[in-house]
Image: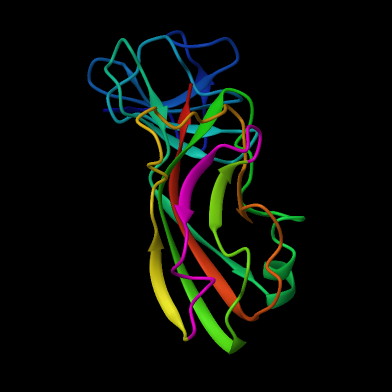
Amino acid sequence: MRNVGTNFFVSNPFGASGEKVALTDDNHYPLLVKGATAPATGTYAQGAIFFNTTTGTTMFNIGTTTAPSFATSAVTTVTSLTSAQILALNTTPITLIAAPGAGYAINLISVMGSLTFATAAYATHTELDIIDATSSAVLFKDTATLLAATASKVATVPVNTNSNAGLVVTANAAVNATVATGNPATGAGTLKLYTTYNIIAL
């Protein structure tokens, strides 16, 4: 491995214009690079680390040396919803994952919910949908477990399997939580949604 200096990046002859490299492997393939956009072409060591200077995101080459494909490691975020937010969730969806930027897409891995029951179960419109914020496609869906619960409950939100077709994910789209059809009519309690995902360079 060749190190060209701590905190010192030089122009990368293997990759995109303006990209910088700090570390290379024994074949002089870049191991640690930075730039404004994750590379889609060029020559990079397998497992090479890319630091996006625009978003602050760190990605890894999961492709081959000559056909790189960069993606983040899986991360889990938690979003807390108040009772007022749940009662308005159809009118005002809540963002779980922000849009990743042009040239990137969110790979949603799993969603888990933790409902803290208060005084009454939510009623009428209780289908919890996790959606692509651009297309409104339902990616994950819980029809009756969390919001309709009559006691505190932890449960997964299942992948939407209503059709045999693939679930279309829009590039640079956020992921939102909403409820189908309309706002819940009544109910009280709070909800935490644990969302596990990674970001893929297209």
* Picture coordinates of residue 52, whole percent (x, y): 56, 32
Which segment is the magenta one?
Answer: 133-150
Using the rendered view, name the quadrant where residue 125 is placed.
Answer: bottom right
Q: Could you tell me which residue is drawn at 33 percent across and 12 percent down?
A: 67
Rendered view: 119 above or below 185: below
Apparent side of residue 139 relative to residue 123 in the rendered image (left or right)? left
Using the rendered view, name the quadrant where residue 190 is placed.
Answer: bottom right
Name the outermost residue toward the front.
Answer: 124
Q: Is residue 140 magenta?
A: yes
Q: Main secondary structure of the magenta part?
A: loop
Q: Could you tell me which residue is drawn at 27 percent across and 17 percent down?
A: 64
Name the outermost residue toward the bottom.
Answer: 119
Task: Name the one closer to the observer, 71 or 95.
Answer: 95
* Picture coordinates of residue 77, whole percent (x, y): 51, 59
Q: Could you tell me which residue is drawn at 66 percent across and 34 percent down?
A: 134
Task: Name the one closer to the observer, 145 or 57.
Answer: 145
Apparent side of residue 155 relative to residue 143 in the rendered image (left or right)? left
